């Protein structure tokens, strides 16, 4: 559990950076054999590309770094429960394990709305650990959206 907290703290750092540049504060880290392979944070606002979620960015960078689309022995740490698109990318890249912080009640496809990563009908299933640094991840999101609502008034 200590190593999961360590890597989640790196993902939280990515999320805080995303918030500081006006992006929805979600951060992700891909780890293999105890080594950080890649990181990512949301970039949709800056790139104006809908698929620029933290998980997608981290997965793509890991594929490039490892010279493979198969991330079989990797763990993805992400601050917020992945959405349907990101869960699809997780399955397609064969990530072994996903560790996430807080639930995403409106868009989560791991536990909240769907259980895509553990669905036995899929050709790949992923181990899931939820709730690591959940309070911190939720606070980052809440603070970001509270400030956003305040500035739009």
Image (cartoon, grey):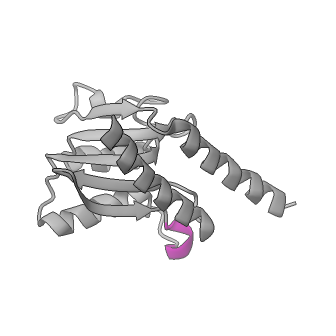
Measured as percent of width and height from the top left, residue 57 is found at 36, 63
In this image, 69 relative to 85: left or right?
left
User: Which of the image's four quarters has the C terminus?
Assistant: bottom right
SS majority, magenta: helix
Residue ranking furthest to the right: 153
Q: Residue at x 42, y 44 (%)?
A: 82
Is 78 magenta? The answer is no
Measured as percent of width and height from the top left, residue 34 is found at 20, 51
Measured as percent of width and height from the top left, residue 78 is found at 41, 48
In this image, 105 relative to 77: left or right?
right
Residue 33 appears in the picture as rendered: yes
Q: Residue at x 41, y 32 (%)?
A: 130
- Along the line of sight, the residue nearer the viewer: 74 or 2: 2
Residue 22 appears in the picture as rendered: no
The number of numbered discs placed on residues in the rendered structure image is: 0
Q: Quadrant of residue 37?
A: bottom left
Q: Residue at x 49, y 29 (%)?
A: 112
Q: Residue at x 25, y 39 (%)?
A: 97
Decide: is 131 above or below 149: above
Magenta segment range?
A: 43-47
Residue ranking furthest to the front: 2
Q: Quadrant of residue 4?
A: top left
User: Which of the image's four quarters has the N terminus?
Assistant: top left
- Along the line of sight, the residue nearer the viewer: 127 or 6: 6
Measured as percent of width and height from the top left, residue 125 is found at 22, 33
Residue ranking furthest to the top: 120
Decide: is 78 above or below 97: below
Is 45 magenta? The answer is yes
- Along the line of sight, the residue nearer the viewer: 2 or 131: 2
């Amino acid at each position: 559990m200590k190593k999961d907290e360590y890597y989640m703290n790196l993902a939280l750092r990515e999320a805080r950076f995303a918030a500081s540049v006006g992006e929805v504060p979600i951060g992700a880290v891909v780890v293999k054999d105890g080594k950080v392979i890649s990181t990512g944070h949301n970039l949709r606002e800056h790139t104006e590309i809908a698929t620029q979620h933290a998980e997608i960015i981290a997965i793509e960078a890991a594929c490039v770094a490892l010279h493979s689309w198969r991330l079989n022995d990797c763990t993805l740490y992400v601050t917020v429960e992945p959405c349907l698109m990101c869960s699809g990318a997780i399955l397609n890249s064969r990530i072994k394990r996903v560790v996430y912080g807080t639930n995403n009640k409106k868009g989560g496809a791991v536990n909240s709305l769907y259980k895509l990563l553990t669905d036995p009908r899929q050709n790949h299933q992923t181990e899931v650990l939820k709730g690591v640094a959940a309070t911190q991840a939720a606070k980052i999101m809440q603070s970001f959206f509270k400030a956003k609502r305040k500035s739009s008034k």
